[in-house]
């Protein structure tokens, strides 16, 4: 019997990855859902235990016992398989707030303190100093070359750092075409490239956006909880993502201040 799964929230990357009439395939499963691939693009169908994000379709109940290789097709406003169907019509869209330079400036002290507490990822330790130099110089091509596909996990550690870097550049208003080129040319997995492409558009998982908002509002308890939440994502993905955000956000604020010149002195 086909189960009817109710959509709770849909990332914009779901419809973008799975156009009407296209067939996809379940290429991986995890505790609360599965990953669907359509050509080279990927998205997740997951239960409410998973945080919303740009390539996540959150449903109730969670899909269970999904076999790898299951065909999933889109028929107008529905996603269908032999196991379940999901009516996408009216599904609330995931639309996270995008911090700008002012918010990043307010968030900078908390993000810098967070960065100073993070351990360097073991699988990036040998290349870490060149990574730091590339990120500090806003050299995204070199940063990509140093980070792409490096490390373990469904999304390799280096890709997660790069996602944080791209996120902050998007929030700063960097050239969107350049950011997307960096994301799309990364030599890594299809899942990582999907995450990177949406990071280049300024979108990540909901707790990441919450973390920056809490930091900008100087909400230390809320910020600490958000850091713990993001850090717990995946084996090392959350911490690596925090590294990319921390390195780039604190550097971007320093650069913006320097470009603006010294603050005006008040008249005695």
Image: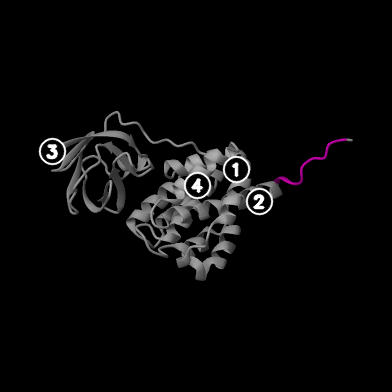
Q: Residue at x 17, y 51 (%)?
A: 67
* Residue 83 position in % (x across, y down): 15, 43
Look at mark 2 in the image and give the residue it sits on. Answer: 255
Q: Residue at x 42, y 52 (%)?
A: 196
Q: CA distance from mark 2 to mark 4?
A: 25 Å
The residue lying furthest to the bottom in this view is 126
Secondary structure beneath dot 2 equals helix
The residue lying furthest to the top in this view is 90
Magenta highlight range? 260-267
10 Å crowding of disc 4: few (<14), some (14-19), many (20+): many
Q: Residue at x 42, y 51 (%)?
A: 232
Above or below, 121 relative to 268: below
Q: Are marks 3 and 1 in contact (CB under 8 Å)?
A: no
Q: CA distance from mark 4 to mark 1?
A: 13 Å
Secondary structure beneath dot 3 equals loop
Q: CA distance from mark 3 to mark 4?
A: 39 Å
Look at mark 3 in the image and give the residue it sits on. Answer: 2
Look at mark 1 in the image and give the residue it sits on. Answer: 107
Q: Residue at x 30, y 28 (%)?
A: 90
Residue 227's disc number: 4
Secondary structure beneath dot 4 equals helix
First reached walking from the N terminus: tag 2 or tag 3: 3
Q: Are marks 4 and 1 in contact (CB under 8 Å)?
A: no
Above or below, 148 relative to 178: below
Which dot, 3 or 4, sits closer to the camera?
Answer: 4
Which dot, 2 or 1, sits closer to the camera?
Answer: 1
Which dot, 2 or 3, sits closer to the camera?
Answer: 3
Secondary structure beneath dot 1 equals helix
* Residue 129 position in % (x across, y down): 57, 67
């Amino acid at each position: 019997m086909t189960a009817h799964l109710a959509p709770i929230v849909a990332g914009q990357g779901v419809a973008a990855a799975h156009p009407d009439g296209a067939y996809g395939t379940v290429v991986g499963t995890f505790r609360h859902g599965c990953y669907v691939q359509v050509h080279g693009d990927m998205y997740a169908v997951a239960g409410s235990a998973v945080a919303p994000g740009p390539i996540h379709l959150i449903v109730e109940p969670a899909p269970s016992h999904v076999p790898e290789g299951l065909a999933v097709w889109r028929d107008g406003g529905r996603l269908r398989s032999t196991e379940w169907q999901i009516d996408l019509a009216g599904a609330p869209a995931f639309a996270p707030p995008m911090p700008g330079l002012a918010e990043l400036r307010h968030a900078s002290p908390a993000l810098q303190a967070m960065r100073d507490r993070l351990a360097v990822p073991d699988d990036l330790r040998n290349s870490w100093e060149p990574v730091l130099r590339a990120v500090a110089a806003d050299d995204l091509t070199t940063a990509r070359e140093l980070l792409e596909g490096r490390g373990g996990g469904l999304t390799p550690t280096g890709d997660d750092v790069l996602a944080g870097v791209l996120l902050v550049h998007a929030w700063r208003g960097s050239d969107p075409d350049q950011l997307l080129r960096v994301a799309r040319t990364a030599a890594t997995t299809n899942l990582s490239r999907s995450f990177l492409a949406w990071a280049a558009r300024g979108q990540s998982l909901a707790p990441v956006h919450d973390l920056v908002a809490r930091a900008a509002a100087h909400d230390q308890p809320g910020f600490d909880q958000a850091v713990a939440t993001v850090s717990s994502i995946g084996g090392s993905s959350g911490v690596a993502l925090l590294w990319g955000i921390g390195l780039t956000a604190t550097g971007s604020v320093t650069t913006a201040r320097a470009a603006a010149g010294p603050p005006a002195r008040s008249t005695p």
